[in-house]
Amino acid sequence: MSEITAGDLPITRERGALTGPAGRKPKKVFDWGRILVYSVLIIAAAFYLFPLYIMIITSLKDLDGIRLGNLFIPPANPSFDAWFKAWDTACTGLYCQGIKVGFWNSVKITVPSVIVSISVAAITGYTLAMWPYKGAQFFFTVLLLGSFIPYQVMLYPLVLITAYLHIFSTLWAVIMIHTIFGMPILVLLFRNYFISIPPELFKAARVDGAGFWRIFFQVLVPMSLPIFVVALILQVTGIWNDFLFGVIFAGTTNFPITVQLNNIVNSLQGVKEYNVDMAATILTGAVPLIIYFVSGKLFVRGIAAGAVKG
């Protein structure tokens, strides 16, 4: 080993190689590119979070505090009375039972719709990716083209179909429609995700004697958590926030929470209670927000794999 001096920094020669000073490369004090990126992100975050801030502080005020007009100032004595009223006693049309009835109706609609649509779409995407059959590409093309047809065009035929099946004005009608309309995008995501998996893995499972269902449940499902999370978030968000199908097909006694929220906000009877409106709005959007925040990282991984690859 020999030592060479380059200025004031010692450089060690060992086995014919030069090794410089160890440690991390010093960072610039002012990185204008990083400053620009963070500035844009902060402005965008403030733009989207500011309305939420207004909603929260308004929901914690009483009517006297709202009448003062201090829209941006937090309440001196915050109270959750508006939240309790929105949940339990707010009038949503002819009934004054709060949005809790619509909340449980939305749960009854969302849970089976999500389970059935994701299960069928996962199996269909797996079949198209791993077990292609004659006419599979044509079926996949027709399925995708169907996703571009506006919902409004199909409303009247769907009303006739659900009436013929004797499920119109029931929760089953809304569940069936959400399941059907969720299929195209979910099949696309699952098919693209499964087709990006190395084919050697599928061939090895076939050599070991695994069949259709064993490969799906024991090989693909355990390694496909990100795309299942993507499907879960997309379906929960779309079904929970739906208004059109709920107001048409559910019936007056089965209205989901979005329809009841509309009835609360647009009610013209009595004093306009903006704090109750804001509390009801936050309660309505809480479920998809919680699911997204809990599984946000998996959502990004899954959407990148399912939408870009393949």
Image (cartoon, rainbow, N blue to C red):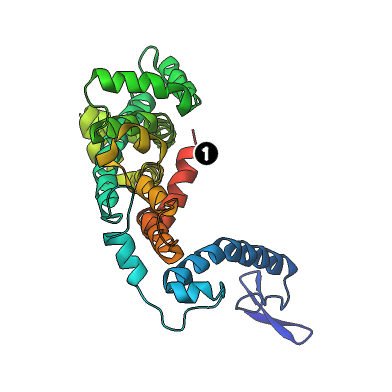
Q: Along the line of sight, which residue is nearer the eye, 25 or 59?
A: 59
Residue appearing at x 36%, y 32% in the figure: 248
Q: Which quadrant holds residue 3?
A: bottom right
Residue 81 figure quarter: bottom left
At label 1, counting other C-alpha atoms closer than 10 Å, the crowd grade (few under 14, some 14-19, many 20 or more) is few
Q: At 29% from the left edge and 43% from the top edge, which residue is drawn?
A: 110
Q: Secondary structure at mark 1?
A: helix
Identify the residue at image location x=42%, y=74%: 62
* Position of residue 47 measured from the top left corner of the image (x, y, whole percent): 60, 62
Residue 213 coordinates in the image, percent (x, y): 21, 30
Question: Is residue 213 visible from the viewing direction of this image?
Answer: yes
Residue 169, above or below 49:
above
Left or right: residue 270 compared with residue 211 = right
Tally of numbered tags: 1
Name which residue type carries label 1. Answer: Val
The picture places residue 132, in percent across and down from the top left corner, at: 36, 20
Q: Residue furthest front?
A: 270
Residue located farthest toward the top when viewing the structure as drawn: 134
Q: Nearer the viewer, residue 205 or 159?
A: 159
Residue under numbered circle 1: 308
Residue 202 visible in the displayed image:
no
112 lies above or below 148 = below
Relative to 228, 147 lies left or right: right
Position of the N terminus by quadrant: bottom right
Q: Residue at x 76, y 87 (%)?
A: 8
Asked if residue 106 is positioned above or below residue 113 in the image, the reply reads: below
**The one of 38 and 59 positioned closer to us in this rendering:** 59
- Residue 15 spot, x, y in % from top left: 61, 70
Q: Residue furthest bottom?
A: 8
